[in-house]
Image: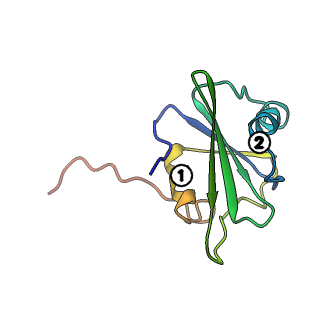
Amino acid sequence: MLRPEGERLRVYLHREPIDMRLQRTGLASLAQEVIRQDPFSADAIFAFIGKRYDRLKLLVWDNNGFVLWYKVIESREKFVWPRDAQDAVVTLTVEQLNWLLDGHDVFRQPHRMLRLAYAS
């Protein structure tokens, strides 16, 4: 399974639901005009949610073209998406994005990675 990885990556969530018929050029336009980031940046991931909150698209620039990643939840569950935020864009870490893709609510109960130095 392909998953975003890398500590240098920045994840930008477009907070408002979109028409999921939008493809790479339409999503790149939203990244540039609404999110106000360069869609051709190699260290940025742009995430978009559908109106029913069960479909998600990720847009990433990869050297010479866009990669469009599409996930549909095949049950009654929904992606947990920030609906109360004031800004049109929410930023996440790649780790938080992967938790979101797994169905976790990263906005109400933020997860934190334990970095332990000693076992005993």
Q: Earlier in the sequence, mark 2 or mark 1?
A: 2
Q: Nearer the viewer, mark 2 or mark 1?
A: 2
Image x and y of residue 12, in percent: 67, 41
Q: Is residue 80 left or right of residue 97?
A: right
Element carrying mark 2 = loop
Q: Residue at x 68, y 49 (%)?
A: 57
Q: Residue at x 14, y 57 (%)?
A: 120
Query: Are there few (<14), some (14-19), or many (20+) residues within 10 Å of tag 1?
Result: some
Image x and y of residue 96, in percent: 53, 52
Kind of residue indicated by mark 2: Gln
- Per the rendering, the mark at residue 23 is 2
Query: Are there few (<14), some (14-19), or many (20+) residues within 10 Å of tag 2?
Result: few
Please identify the residue farthest to the bottom as the structure is shown: 76
Q: Is residue 103 left or right of residue 119?
A: right
Element carrying mark 1 = helix
Kind of residue indicated by mark 1: Gln
Marks 2 and 1 close (CB-CB < 8 Å): no
Instruction: From the image, tell me which residue sits under label 1.
Output: 96
Q: What coloring was used for the rendering?
A: rainbow
Image x and y of residue 6, in percent: 46, 36
Between 10 and 41, which is closer to the camera in this rendering? 41
Q: Residue at x 47, y 47 (%)?
A: 2
- Per the rendering, the mark at residue 81 is none
